[in-house]
Image (cartoon, coloured by chain):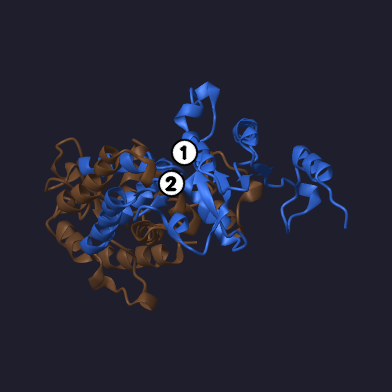
Chain colours: A blue, B brown
Amino acid sequence: MSLPDPLVRLIEELQRLPGIGPKGAQRLAFHVLKTPRDETDRLTDAIRDVKEQVTYCSICSNITDSDPCVYCSSSDRDRTIICVVEEPQNVAAIEKSRDYRGTYHVLMGTLSPLQGIGPDDLKIKGLVTRIGAGGVGEVILATNPTVEGEATALYLARLLKPLGVRVTRIATGIPVGSDLEYADEVTMNRALEGRREV
Amino acid sequence: MSLPDPLVRLIEELQRLPGIGPKGAQRLAFHVLKTPRDETDRLTDAIRDVKEQVTYCSICSNITDSDPCVYCSSSDRDRTIICVVEEPQNVAAIEKSRDYRGTYHVLMGTLSPLQGIGPDDLKIKGLVTRIGAGGVGEVILATNPTVEGEATALYLARLLKPLGVRVTRIATGIPVGSDLEYADEVTMNRALEGRREV
């Protein structure tokens, strides 16, 4: 099989993207080939604009196109609460719930000794500075309930409690709308441990 | 939730791609955000190069970066056989089998009266010209075994047989390595109809 070189290169580049395998990359490449030039230009411009215009908030490390970000600069948000998440996309997930009115702090990863990621590689220093400046009453640790996320939460709890703030962790348990039958043992265990008076 | 505008635009553009939904587009956009600039440049360059450098072969309508394409210009290929396919990616599928040493003709679609696609919208005229020029002994109809593909094959068979060439159709049946249990009735029927002496 000999596809034209530019197409082979595009397939290779597309395969580097997460969740796109060889078949998917080929389908996308042939789609690009058939798509009018102005549509593919819109896509490449959008990619370039994201790289050029989107930066990170100097306060909370969330992604933003203006510094500080909308959450850190808004007068509507409660600055006494900081919700700590792993990645910028986690902010979007929490905002979707429409319940949270505090501010955020994005760690840009989790502690992972095996991959050589220690506290200095995460945006922890900035978080400590924010708490040190005063006015913060509660820090909600909303890292993922994975091994790395739990370890990071534990590390942060030990680090932040001596600073005199209330440190909380989001609840783990059975997701709303799902069936007990499909819950794994660890989640079931957590759901039982975390039971509350009704 | 308020993501930066450039990111929202990128998510919108990514969602236009086939097989990429809202969640997938968001994941890809955040991936672009984290990826070093030179890697995203390689991707956008690859897209632009495909649009600028890949064209269609003037003989067989296959995609190529030089005209005529490798199959039409190669002295290794048997020009007495033409394999007719719907799309350029079908050529790749047939080449993978490593069995076929003839040339190709890409129709760039199938007959589809409902979508207003008639014979004049496909590359049929060029196929008739190639056969008319003489030297072609067999035309293999390798359109997909779908309603449109079958209709297109039937139309071509009626059109080409009077030109004095042998017209054949690829076999349909149970795929190699699969289980009869999972074959649909139509495929099972075709497999029985197409049975051969052993």
- Residue matched to label 1: A126
Residue underneath mark 2? A59
Secondary structure of the residue carrying tag 1 is helix
Quarter of image, res B159: bottom left
Q: Residue at 35% x, 52% y: name it.
A: A67
Q: Residue B101: horizontal and vertical position, in percent?
A: 27, 39
Residue A57 position in % (x across, y down) = 40, 48
Q: Are marks 1 and 2 on the same chain?
A: yes
| Whole-percent x, y for residue B97 in the image | 37, 38
Instruction: Choose the circle earlier in sequence order: 1 or 2.
Output: 2
Amino acid marked by disc 2? Ile
Q: Amino acid at mark 1?
A: Gly
Looking at the image, the residue that sits furthest to the right is A197
Query: Is B156 situated above or below A48?
Result: below
From this viewpoint, is residue A39 visible?
yes
Percent x, y of residue A177: 73, 59
The Cα–Cα distance between marks 1 and 2, rounded to whole angstroms, is 7 Å
Answer few, some or many: residues within 10 Å of disc 2's Cα (few below 14, many 20 plus, some between 14 and 19): many
Quarter in which the C terminus of chain A is drawn = bottom right
Quick one: quadrant of the N terminus of chain A? Answer: top left
Give the vertical position of B124 relative to A21 (above or below).
below
